[in-house]
Image (cartoon, rainbow, N blue to C red):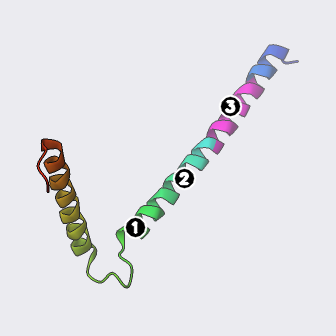
Amino acid sequence: MPEPTLVIAGAALVGLVVVVAALLKGWQGWLALKQREMDVQATPAKGAGGSPLIVARIELSDLKERIRKLEAIASGVDP
């Protein structure tokens, strides 16, 4: 007859493995969700026109312009 301590330890180990497997499955699902969200954001809308590269360049130029304005404000110069 197995010792009660070994039975409890074995059951705890099996329970831990089940919990870890469930958490890992949830983590992979969350990562897949975030990947799909990034894919949707990367593809431009039908009305936006242009390739994703062009859209990215436009966004980059907008960000650079915002940075220039913020630097001008920080230095005390009116933009």
Do the CB atoms of the residues marked 3 and 1 lie less than 8 Å apart? Answer: no
Whole-percent x and y of residue 69? Answer: 17, 55
Q: Earlier in the sequence, mark 2 or mark 1?
A: 2
Q: Which residue is mark 1?
A: 41
Identified by mark 2, the residue type is Trp
Observer-nearest residue: 58 or 33? 58
CA gap between label 3 and label 1 equals 37 Å
Choose top left, top right, bottom left or bottom right for residue 42. Answer: bottom left
Q: Secondary structure at mark 3?
A: helix
Residue extent of the magenta highlight: 10-22
Whole-percent x and y of residue 58? Answer: 21, 70
Q: Secondary structure at mark 2?
A: helix
At a point 74% along the width and 20% down the height, the residue shown is: 9
Whole-percent x and y of residue 77? Answer: 11, 49
Question: Vertically, is 14 above or below 66?
Answer: above
Identified by mark 3, the residue type is Leu
Q: Which residue is mark 2?
A: 30
Answer whether residue 20 is magenta in the image. yes
Camera-near label (2 vs 1) is 1
Q: Residue 14 has which mark?
A: none
Q: How many marks?
A: 3
The quarter of the picture where the N terminus appears is top right
Observer-nearest residue: 35 or 25? 35
Q: Which residue is mark 3?
A: 16
Question: Crowdedness of circle 1 by 10 Å Cα count: few (<14), some, many (20+)?
Answer: few
Observer-nearest residue: 3 or 22? 22
Question: Vertically, is 63 above or below 51?
Answer: above
At a point 23% along the width and 72% down the height, the residue shown is: 53
Direction from residue 59 to residue 29 in the image, left or right:
right
Answer whether residue 29 is magenta in the image. no
CA gap between label 3 and label 2 equals 21 Å
